[in-house]
Image (spheres, rainbow, N blue to C red):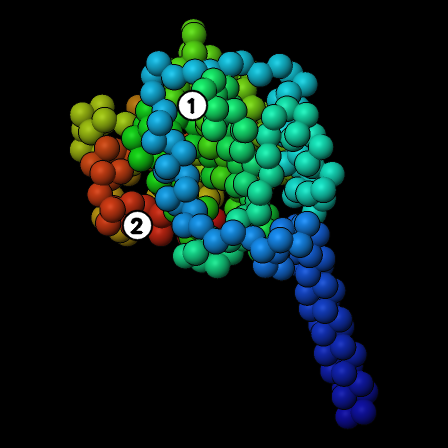
Amino acid sequence: MAKVRAKAITVAAVTVAFGLLVAALSTYTIARSSGDNGRTSDGARAPEVPLERRITDFTAGFAPDGDYREPRRAERRDVADAVGLILDGHPDRARPLLADVGFRLRTLTDTGTGRRYAELSDRTADGPDPRGWARVYVDLSTAVRWSVQVPHPVSDADTERLGARVLLDSPGGVLVLAGAHRRAGEDDAADAAHRTDSVFDAVCDELARRRLPGVQIHGFADDSVPGRDVVASTGEGRAGRPDARRLAAALTARHFSVCRAWARDCPLEGRDNVQGRRAATEHVPFLHIEFARSVRASDGQIRNAVAAIGTVTGR
């Protein structure tokens, strides 16, 4: 009996060890194929940058009268497909698609975390006539598990800072950042949260198709929801409710006053948000989080908000 028990223990130990080895090799393969070895895929050293500063420098020039050109369906699809190829560990196959629509792919190392990120950026943003499409950042250090979405940078002041910090706070994220002020262009063409004809939406669709939960960050004026610091919602869907409850509890523990849209009527619930509607169709968890201006204006409050969101993204 003792020999049988010892043999069973040995078999179990070997099985666990084999599983750990397979998982390690899988992660290693993803990292190697994505360029997460300190170098870009062409062998050059990945530049070190403070990623939050890089993101806020990019959005600093956004203005209501800024340029915006609506992308064609094929252009939207090419960027979204390129994101999918990067998630699958094929950056070299993504580059031609991006080049066809005037995008570039870089590998950057964040100086704060030491993690490497793929940056998909519109080349026209450096020229006199920016199209204002989007930027995307993909964590290359591990398998991607979630996304943070910022559809109204600058317009919802400092949501770009919140989004950047959420990305950097937890491994395994994708940041999807609108490329223009929401009032740019004509007839609300650049309002990424309410348009299905944007690069931003096409990328979010690709992530939802891959069943990646999303956290979308917005902002409101303090007097829009008096007495509340945060409005937390799952938009049109219900799949995100366990995560929403966990997030609301974490925010409350950090002394934020939270309006829980699944428990009572709240303003700014985001039920007409197009990314939330797509997530609901796919039964993918989606959180629509609105922060008061007083929260977004305080570095300490931003840290607390990011830490609370981390209780969800860290899972």
Indicate the quadrant containing the N terminus: top left, top right, bottom left or bottom right. Answer: bottom right
The answer to whether 253 appears left or right of 79 in the picture is: left
Q: Residue at x 18, y 25 (%)?
A: 223
Instruction: Determine whether the residue tagged by mark 2 lies in a helix, strand or loop.
Output: helix
- Mark 1 to mark 2 CA distance (whole Å): 25 Å
Q: Which residue is denoted by mark 1 in the rendering?
A: 180
Return the disc, 1 or 2, that comes first in the chain's sequence: 1
Viewer-side label of 1, 2: 1
Q: Is residue 91 above or below residue 131?
A: below
Q: Which residue is denoted by mark 2 in the rendering?
A: 303
The answer to whether 306 appears left or right of 91 in the picture is: left
Instruction: Determine whether the residue tagged by mark 1 lies in a helix, strand or loop.
Output: loop
Q: Nearer the viewer, residue 49 or 176?
A: 49
| Residue 88, position as x, y percentages in the image | 70, 44
Q: Residue at x 50, y 19 (%)?
A: 131
Determine which quarter of the picture holds residue 267. top left
Q: Amino acid at mark 2?
A: Arg
| Residue 114, position as x, y percentages in the image | 48, 59
- Name, please, the residue furthest toward the top: 187
| Residue 91, position as x, y percentages in the image | 68, 43
Determine which quarter of the picture holds residue 52. top left
